[in-house]
Image: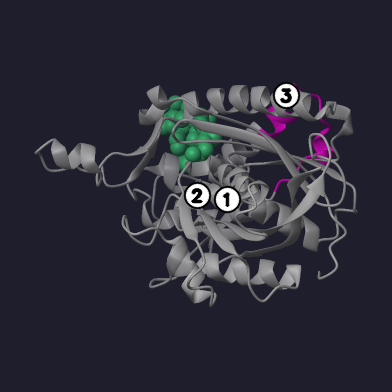
């Protein structure tokens, strides 16, 4: 028997500032119809002035701990692309806000794949016996890095946070069976594609260049069409790899719980994998693309809507900046603290 990771609790949090498509159409050259038909998004939430990623992360984290029936956890792993500051990491701030100062806490940066990478990292901590419980959070305030002059990205992203508490358990074999089991994982990256999804300024590369940042370089940018193509390709490949590891077929999957980048990507991916659209978790219409927060946010909302039963098999897959991608599986637990 080896140590494995099990889902013990889940929670999420959205900021209160609701931004419907019409509000964006009033201030840039776009329309509700273009946004809905090209992305599936109807609205998103932006954090209020003064609210940062650590605030959203702490709220989601507190809800996940409550769901797990725990007042404390042994470690905090935060996936984010929008840390409160470039230095230090935001996870220790989140831990302090949750009354967990003194515990190990660190950030994982894999853009929209961040939550899958953070889950894998947490599973590693549990498997090594470093800790018995880990709070894994995905949280973003993408509204702080969107270029108001770039309609292609400004209409896609939203702010939010989602979190899971993982607890160590015992597992035989590949560990992907039974109550709440998480894993195995398939993870990958391709740094030659760093320009496709990026914030060019603010790092060592731009500072070393000796010149001031070009206009717009402080903002997020994305080559949407090329990213779309690669997203479907890599998520499909990664999802198949993880299904192969665990010995499941597409027909065994009850829920496809993927990064919410674009509704058309979710539909295309389900089609390529041979998973019926009715089994795709999609909350992008209501919250937009919340990057590292999107997978736990979608899963938590579906859980609270009563869509899962114990034993349901979830396939998680994500693609994002880096480029990065990753997939894992989760067997839905019998959560006793809803
Ligand atoms: N409103 C109106 N028109 C627009 C808008 C807008 N908001 N944005 C772009 N357009 C126009 C373009 O200018 C272009 O016009 P043209 O044909 O006259 O040149 C036309 O619409 C088509 O542009 P495309 O970029 O080809 O549009 P596309 O259909 O590809 O949709 C989108 C763009 C939504 C960004 C899509 O490509 C996409 O979802 N890409 C993948 C996103 C993704 O998976 N990201 C990975 C994770 S995110 C992360 O890691 C942070």
Q: Earlier in the sequence, mark 2 or mark 1?
A: 2
Disc 2, ligand 1: is the CB inside 8 Å? yes
Measured as percent of width and height from the top left, residue 167 is found at: 72, 58
Q: Along the line of sight, which residue is nearer the eye, 226 or 43?
A: 226
Give the magenta-colored segment's residue range. 266-282
Disc 3, ligand 1: is the CB inside 8 Å? no
Say if mark 2 contacts mark 1, CB within 8 Å: yes
Measured as percent of width and height from the top left, residue 224 is found at: 47, 31
Circle 3 residues within 10 Å: few <14, some 14–19, many ≥20? some
Residue 41 visible from this viewpoint: no
Please give the residue where the numbered disc 3 appears in the rendered image: 240
Measured as percent of width and height from the top left, residue 138 is found at: 56, 54
270 horizontally vs 81: left or right = right
The N terminus - image quarter: top right
Tag nearer the camera, 3 or 2:
3
Please give the residue where the numbered disc 1 appears in the rendered image: 288
Q: Earlier in the sequence, mark 3 or mark 2?
A: 2
Q: Secondary structure at mark 2?
A: loop
């Amino acid at each position: 028997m080896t140590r494995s990771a099990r889902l013990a609790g889940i929670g999420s949090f959205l900021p209160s500032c609701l931004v419907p498509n019409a509000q964006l159409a009033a201030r840039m050259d776009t329309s509700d119809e273009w946004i809905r038909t090209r992305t599936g998004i109807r609205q998103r939430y932006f954090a209020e002035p003064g609210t940062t990623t650590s605030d959203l992360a702490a709220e989601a984290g507190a809800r996940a701990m409550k769901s797990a029936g725990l007042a404390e956890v042994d470690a905090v792993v935060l996936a984010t692309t929008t840390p409160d500051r470039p230095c230090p990491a935001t996870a220790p701030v989140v831990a302090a806000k949750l009354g967990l100062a003194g515990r190990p806490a660190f950030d994982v940066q894999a853009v929209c794949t961040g939550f899958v990478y953070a889950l894998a990292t947490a599973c590693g901590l549990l498997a090594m016996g470093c800790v018995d419980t880990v709070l894994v959070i995905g949280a973003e305030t993408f509204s702080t890095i969107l270029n108001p002059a770039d309609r292609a990205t400004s209409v896609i992203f939203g702010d939010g946070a989602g979190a899971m508490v993982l607890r160590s358990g015992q597992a035989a074999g590949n560990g992907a069976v039974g109550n709440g089991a998480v894993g195995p994982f398939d993870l990958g990256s391709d740094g030659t594609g760093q320009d496709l999804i990026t914030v060019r300024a603010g790092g060592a590369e731009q500072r070393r260049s000796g010149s001031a940042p070009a206009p717009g370089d402080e903002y997020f940018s994305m080559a949407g069409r090329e990213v779309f193509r690669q997203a479907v390709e890599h998520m499909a490949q990664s999802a198949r790899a993880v299904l192969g590891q665990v010995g499941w077929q597409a027909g065994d999957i009850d829920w496809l719980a993927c990064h919410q980048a674009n509704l058309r990507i979710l539909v295309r991916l389900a089609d390529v994998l041979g998973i019926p659209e009715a089994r795709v978790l999609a909350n992008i219409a209501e919250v937009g693309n919340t990057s590292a927060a999107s997978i736990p946010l979608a899963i938590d909302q579906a859980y609270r809507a009563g869509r899962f039963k114990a034993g349901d098999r979830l396939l998680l897959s994500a693609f994002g900046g880096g480029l990065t991608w990753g997939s894992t599986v989760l067997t839905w637990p019998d959560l006793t603290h809803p």
